[in-house]
Amino acid sequence: MTEVATTTTGRRVYIDKQHPQAFRALRSNAEAVREAAAEAGLDRRLVELVNLRVSQINGCAYCLDVHTKAALLAGESVQRLGVLNAWRDTALFDERERAALALAEATTHPADATAQDVAYAQARAVLGDEQISAVIWVAIAINAFNRVSILSKHPVRPARVAAEAVVNA
């Protein structure tokens, strides 16, 4: 029997479990994207910032949980994660990170052509072609995972260890 989530509007099919071959293909794509990002010189912290920012925009609790843990393990600070939603309003992010975040947002909202042009110009000033492509691919991949988790209503379960243990890891 396929797993389902029960919500106030009824049961949801875990689409990753219903069609595991499709989900395996999505995971393979994510692995290729991760490799492309590393080859382009994007460190894991920046990749996780992109994953988190896109997941914030999309409201994907499950992906926010997963990628917050991944960002902390990659060495990201709690402070920067706490203000990521307002990255434009703080000096905590450098020019490369700002360009990547703007490009990720433009990828997540492709209908906003003006924002796309501005983000692309900003990225063009500080990132090479390979890095621009990698950032866009990271945003595309996490957008796909967000859709899987949001539409399946994947639950966020309580952590088994205290948050302090994760932060100090």
Image: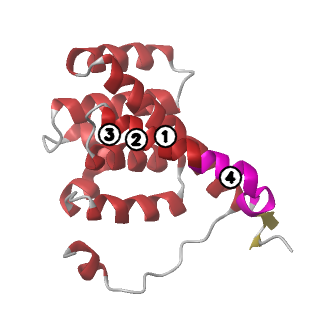
Identify the residue position indicated by label 1 in the image: 32
Q: Mark 3 — residue?
A: 38
Read off the magenta span. Answer: 15-27
Q: Are marks 2 and 1 in contact (CB under 8 Å)?
A: yes
Q: CA distance from mark 2 to mark 1?
A: 5 Å
Residue drawn 74% across the image and 58% down it = 20
Q: Tell me how far mark 1 sits from mark 3, CA to CA.
A: 10 Å
Q: Which residue is mark 2?
A: 35
Q: Is residue 142 above or below residue 168?
A: above
Which secondary structure lies at badge 4?
Answer: helix
The x, y position of residue 73, in whole percent, is: 28, 64
Neighbourhood count class around disc 1 (C-alpha, 10 Å): few under 14, some 14–19, many 20 upward? some
Q: Are marks 4 and 1 in contact (CB under 8 Å)?
A: no
Residue that carries the numbered disc 4 in the rendered image: 23
Q: Are marks 2 and 3 in contact (CB under 8 Å)?
A: yes
Residue 120 visible to the viewer: yes
Query: In whole angstroms, how far apart are the C-alphas of marks 2 and 3?
Result: 5 Å
Q: Nearer the viewer, mark 4 or mark 1?
A: 1
Q: Amino acid at mark 3?
A: Ala
Q: Is residue 89 left or right of residue 71?
A: left
Mark pair 4, 3: CA separation: 23 Å
Q: Are marks 2 and 4 in contact (CB under 8 Å)?
A: no
